[in-house]
Every structure is written in C-alpha cells, then in structure tokens.
Amino acid sequence: MRFHVLTLFPQMILDGMNTSITGRAIEGGLMSVEAINIRDYADNKHMKVDDYPYGGGAGLVMQAAPVCAAYDALTEKIGKRPRVVYMTPQGHTFNQQMAKDFAKEENLVLLCGHYEGIDERALELIVTDYVSIGDYVLTGGELPAMVVIDAVSRLVPGVLHNDESAETESFENGLLEYPQYTRPVEFRGMRVPDVLLSGHHGNVDKWRHEQSLIRTKKYRPDLYDAYMKSSK
Ligand code: 6GU
C-alpha cells in the first residue's frame, strides 16, 4: 500500500511515520509513505502558497494552484488517479469501517490543510473523501493524516505480526476490549482475576466477553445499544 501525503510540513509526516510499527512496515517494504511538499509547487519566486480570503476575515487560505500542481505531478508520476482524502474538521468522522475501506486501495492520497483551509476550487477538483478525526480543532491536517495512515496500515496484510493480531480488538466486534494483565500475579496488593490463571479457555472467553459488555455499557453506551440491537 502506498500513502502519498500532500502537506506544507513533510518532515512532520516522515518523523511520525518512520517510528514503531509503521516504521517497521515501511522498512520491510509492506507500505510506503511519501510526503510531498506543496510549497515545492508554488509558482512564484517567494514560494508563497497562501493569501487573504476573498470577502475578508481572519487568517490565510491555501491557494488552489500549488495544491493542484502537486496533485497533477503525483498522478502523472504514478499513472493513476487515486482517492484523495482531505483532512478537515468538516469531514465525516473517521472510524474503523473507513479504515477497512481505505485499506483496499493500492494508493491513497492524504491532503493536509493549514491556516483557514484550502481554496474550495482545489477541493472540488481533486478531493474524493472529506475526513475528520473528531469534534475538536487542530492547527493542521498532518496529525489527522498520520492517524488515518496508522489505522489503515495495521490492516494491511503482514504489517502486524502474529502476536499483534488485528482481529480481537476494540471495534472489531463492535465492543470495547476487555482488561489485560501480565506478570506479576500480585501488584501493590491487587491480584489478577483468578479466571485468567485457571487455564480454562471457555471460562476465560466468557469472562472477557462479559467484561467487554460491562466496559462498553459504561464508557460507550452508544456502541452498547447498537450491539444489543444487532445481536437480537
Ligand atoms: Cl482532519 N483537521 C483539523 N485541522 N482539525 C481537526 C481534524 C482535521 N479532525 C478533527 N479536528
């Protein structure tokens, strides 16, 4: 899987993605993350890529020309017109289903805005998906793009190793994950639940499922209600 990030801060993307599991996957050739500097496509000698908004108001707007030129250069290079995901608080809220959907793509472009956003005409011309990562405002789309790449990459075959399985986790079955424990059996007077030490797999599975239900009901009543409805 190939990710192409259009950004004014390419180093932020490279620094973020070349670490941990995504870094290992890139190293191993299972995926690639290319950060394309939109500023390299500025058409003026000052390399200016933003300007005041028509109609007035605070802040600056990223101009359409360098964004579209960066996109055109990319599509020319790879000979395809992949999906373009614009990271914006105005988008659909990102979730596990969207991550699964994006993971089917061979190439995925992530467009990161800054300041007050990007000229609407560039968005109309190139964007296929508008995605937010939640109801709060960030200074730019780079962290959201990395969130999307991280969530998608762990669904790419081979990226997670056997002991990092993507299947039994929160959201995979619509419930939050059960609590986990490791050695020692007792820590500051708190013991690991006996059932986990019993070696009885049936009882362990039952306990974990119950714990998932309890947690989901407490912390995510919306998911709990949906789960209860769908399992009727
Ligand atoms: Cl995708 N971008 C920005 N700038 N802020 C956000 C966001 C995206 N998602 C939530 N807040």
Image (cartoon, rainbow, N blue to C red):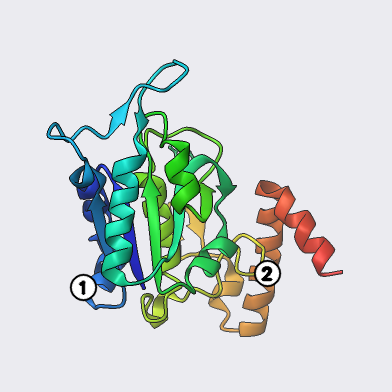
Name the residue tied to disc 1: 27
Q: Residue at x 42, y 44 (%)?
A: 122
- Mark 1 lies on a secondary structure that is helix
Residue positioned most to the left: 45
Camera-nearest residue between 179 and 33: 33
- The residue carrying mark 2 has its beta carbon less than 8 Å from ligand 1: no
Please name the amino acid that badge 1 sits on: Glu
Image location of residue 141, percent across then percent down: 39, 43
User: Which residue lies at the image location 42% right of the left edge and 34% below the top edge?
Assistant: 117
169 sits left or right of 5 in the view = right
Q: Which quarter of the rendering shows the N terminus?
A: bottom left
Q: Residue at x 54, y 69 (%)?
A: 100
Looking at the picture, how far across and down is residue 148, in whole percent?
A: 44, 56
Closer to the camera: disc 2 or disc 1?
1
| Number of numbered discs on residues | 2
Q: Is residue 17 among the parts visible in the rendering?
A: yes
Q: Is residue 105 above or below residue 98?
A: below
Does 54 sit above or below residue 61? above
- Position of 94 relative to 79 (above/below): above
State the residue position of label 2: 209
Residue occupying the far right of the picture: 232
Q: Is residue 32 left or right of residue 96?
A: left
